[in-house]
């Protein structure tokens, strides 16, 4: 297939582009490189040394003989070029990763909130309307988030996207299927909730074929393809805005920095290893919905863990200390989380568990590149409200 990978220079997009190229697809990466600019804005860099996207594509060609084509394009701000690109290249499938994805960055200031909403909602909407306008019947696979559901447990597993409800009518109860009520916990997560409505509308109004992957927190760095050459290495974020919890704990352990648990660490979240994430995208691509079908929603996660349990697990394996810090976020101090993920298991996913992969990751990546870590960028200082901001400590 001819596949466009939007956001293909990012943490999930790059290994996905390699995986799809390796499987024989013609892959085109579209990215505006905003993530690299944000590194400059924040004064941080990936733990792993990343080459330019052009150089990465050159090395991939050298190693495998396969071409990856890169196109510099801003989906949110350059609608006409996007439409033109689609009309010219006519992809059969599109994988959409191209959004601002950090919850803390989205809560940093009013400017960051505005940027995140403008960027994410416009990128998704521009893409949808350009598909309709050009008449391209590509299968669109979007990376959404488990965070759209919120994390309040009602004691029942979170279904894959939809909920059957009974509504009282004058003639008795009527059954209806609705999108699971959304309860985002940050401006970033809110944009993913808005994306869901855009998808529902365009699937119903224009027959677009859409799959939305509600992904958990991705951990790990390498995939089978990124291991093939030092210069194909993936990015790895560890700073207080972009670093996700488990990857942060791993690098903190590698440099003897006390593990930064927010509050009591009672937050339970869904996780998936990067290797499984790229496999899931390929599985979703092979299972496209028909025109006129509702948006297909998968829960793309393999395990749930409580943050303090993760910290204790990493501490046991590495001897690190655990620091319980004031939580910069507004979130439930403790929650349970049960999630259904049968669709990917039925398609053949064999999950990599944390127990298997964790130590290898510490040794291979965190310790190898520990010398590149700027300790001053580790504290998470973006606060959800001004009130919380005044109470957050910046160093454990
Ligand atoms: P990332 O920031 O590393 O990559 C996103 C890429 O999209 C970047 O290369 C960026 O430059 C590009 N981009 C952003 N806005 C763009 C625009 N307007 N036009 C063109 N390119 C643009 O993020 P990631 O971790 O790879 O996440 C990818 C997707 O997966 C996101 O949509 C995110 O919400 C979702 N996701 C990520 C995780 C995770 O743990 N990393 C978990 C669940 C879901
Ligand atoms: N946390 C800590 N210590 C840290 C960092 C985080 O205790 O040093 C806690 C947070 O308070 C939160 C939990 O760990 O309760 C998860 O935080 P995170 O930064 O790892 O993940 P999150 O903000 O939810 O965002 C990440 C990705 C996002 C994706 C989401 C999937 O950045 O793109 O959508 O995971 S999910 O969490 O399932 O919604």
Image (cartoon, rainbow, N blue to C red):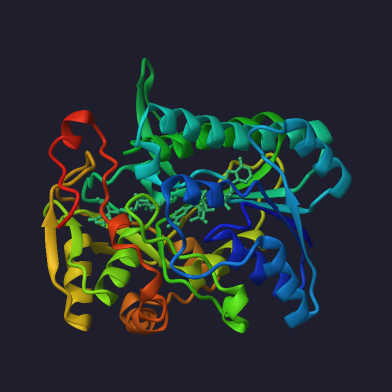
The answer to whether 99 appears left or right of 181 in the picture is: right
Where is residue 376? Give x, y as percent.
28, 57
Where is residue 230? Give x, y as percent.
58, 80
Q: Residue at x 61, y 52 (%)?
A: 7
Where, quadrant-wise, is the C terminus in this rendering? bottom left
The answer to whether 172 appears left or right of 160 in the picture is: left
Residue 26's place in the image compared with 242, above or below, is below
- Asked whether 149 or 384 is in front, the reply is 384
Q: Residue at x 54, y 50 (%)?
A: 35
Where is residue 243? Give x, y as percent.
37, 57
- Asked whether 87 or 34 is in front, the reply is 34
Q: Residue at x 44, y 49 (%)?
A: 145
Residue 222 visible to an observer of this rendering: yes
Residue 293 sits in quarter = top right
Residue 23 visible to an observer of this rendering: no
- Asked whether 254 or 66 is in front, the reply is 254
């Amino acid at each position: 297939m001819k596949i466009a990978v939007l956001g293909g220079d990012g943490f999930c997009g790059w290994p996905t582009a390699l995986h799809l190229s390796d499987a024989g697809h013609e892959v085109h990466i579209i990215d505006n490189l905003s993530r690299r600019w944000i590194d400059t804005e924040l004064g941080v860099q990936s733990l792993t040394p990343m080459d330019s996207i052009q150089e990465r594509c050159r090395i991939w060609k050298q190693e495998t003989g396969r071409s990856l084509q890169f196109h510099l394009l801003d989906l949110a701000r350059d609608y006409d070029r996007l439409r033109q690109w689609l009309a010219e290249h006519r992809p059969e499938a599109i994988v959409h990763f191209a959004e601002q994805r950090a919850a803390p960055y989205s809560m940093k200031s009013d400017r960051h909130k505005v940027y995140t909403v403008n960027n994410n909602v416009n990128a998704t909407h521009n893409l949808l309307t350009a598909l309709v306008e050009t008449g391209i019947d590509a299968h669109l696979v979007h990376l959404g988030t488990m965070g759209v559901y919120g994390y309040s447990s009602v004691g029942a597993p979170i279904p894959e996207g939809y909920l059957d409800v009974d509504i009282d009518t004058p003639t008795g109860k009527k059954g209806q299927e609705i999108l699971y009520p959304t309860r985002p916990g940050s401006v970033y997560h809110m944009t993913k909730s808005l994306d869901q409505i855009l998808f529902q509308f365009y699937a119903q109004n224009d027959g677009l074929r859409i799959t939305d992957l509600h992904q958990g927190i991705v951990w790990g760095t390498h995939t089978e393809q990124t291991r093939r050459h030092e210069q194909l290495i993936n990015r790895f974020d560890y700073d207080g805005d972009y670093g996700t919890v488990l990857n942060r704990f791993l690098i903190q352990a590698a440099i003897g920095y006390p593990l930064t648990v927010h509050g009591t660490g009672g937050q339970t979240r869904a996780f998936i290893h990067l290797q499984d994430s790229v496999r899931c995208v390929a599985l979703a691509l092979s299972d496209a919905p028909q025109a006129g079908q509702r948006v297909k929603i998968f829960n793309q996660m393999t395990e749930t863990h409580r943050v303090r349990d993760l910290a204790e697990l990493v501490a046991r394996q590495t001897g690190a200390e655990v620091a319980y810090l004031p939580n910069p976020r507004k979130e439930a101090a403790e929650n349970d989380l049960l999630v259904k993920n049968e669709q990917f298991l039925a398609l053949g996913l064999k999950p990599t568990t944390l127990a298997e992969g964790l130590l290898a990751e510490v040794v291979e990546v965190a310790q190898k590149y520990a010398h590149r870590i700027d300790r001053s960028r580790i504290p998470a200082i973006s606060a959800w409200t001004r009130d919380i901001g005044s109470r957050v400590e910046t160093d454990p």
